[in-house]
Image (cartoon, rainbow, N blue to C red):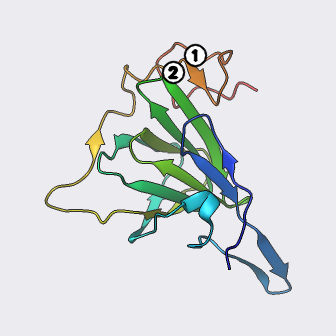
Amino acid sequence: MSTKIEVKNHALDGFRTYELKLTPDERGFFGEALRMDWKELVGDEWIVQVNLSHSYPGIVRAWHRHERGQVDYFLVIRGAMKICAYDENTRKLVEVIASAEKPSIIRVPGHYWHGTKTISNEPTLTVYFVTKLYDYKNPDELRRPWNDPGIVPLEINGRKDDPRIGKQWDWFYPPHR
């Protein structure tokens, strides 16, 4: 029996988010982080490795991508983080905020340039699940600097009227809403 979930699709094909369902009681809460039968989120892929990342406030971990089909699933369990993915062919960028206060699974197809920035005043703790084992001798990782002048989105979250359009991506641009 498959469990149907409500997944949000974003402007980049395959970039999806799912807000976890938490069940509170007098002890705290319980929630499923990832299930194989959540086909709307994972399709036919599955996890082969789980990683843990701790980042101090203001830290940017960007940009990198994977060319051998890896997909990353991010779950922020402490603090708040901006997660971005960029398609250099279409110059579309997706930016989402993930936090421990509203846990969500963020699915990022690895062929997009992607990265994160801790935006909370406390460090972030992120668990991320991946679909390919890390190969120490031949890593599937291409890197660009976090402030690479070649990351210039023409569309952000499906919008072309964002004030950051047509400019080098600035992880430290002040909130504009």
Query: Is 119 left, or right, of 152 in this rendering?
Result: right
Residue 49 badge: none
Q: Dividing the picture into quarters, in which one does residue 28 lie?
A: bottom right
Disc 1 target residue: 165
Q: Quick check: 67 above or below 123?
A: above
User: Mark 1 near mark 2, Cβ–Cβ under 8 Å?
Assistant: yes
Question: CA–CA distance between discs 1 and 2?
Answer: 6 Å
Query: Is 40 left, or right, of 56 in this rendering?
Result: right
Query: Is 29 left, or right, of 103 in this rendering?
Result: right
Identify the residue shown where x is 83% and y is 78%.
Answer: 24
Q: Quick check: 116 above or below 50?
A: above
Q: Dividing the picture into quarters, in which one does residue 37 lie?
A: bottom right
Which residue of the protein is positioned furthest toward the front in this rendering? Answer: 1
Residue closest to the eye, 21 or 144: 21
Asked if one can make out residue 78 in the rendered structure from this viewpoint, the answer is no
Identify the residue shown where x is 76% and y is 68%.
Answer: 21
Q: Quick check: 41 above or below 37?
A: above
Image x and y of residue 42, in percent: 55, 61
Mark 1 neighbour class, 10 Å CA radius: few under 14, some 14 to 19, many 20 or more: some
Residue closest to the eye, 83 or 173: 83
Pick the quarter of the image with the C terminus: top right
Asked if one can make out residue 175 in the rendered structure from this viewpoint, the answer is yes
Dot 1 or dot 2, earlier in sequence: 2
Disc 2 target residue: 153
Residue closest to the eye, 50 or 18: 18
Which residue of the protein is positioned furthest toward the left in this rendering? Answer: 137
Mark 2 neighbour class, 10 Å CA radius: few under 14, some 14 to 19, many 20 or more: many
Q: Quick check: 167 above or below 173?
A: above
Identity, as a three-letter code, of the amino acid under mark 2: Pro
Label 2: which secondary element: loop
Which residue of the protein is positioned furthest toward the right in this rendering? Answer: 26
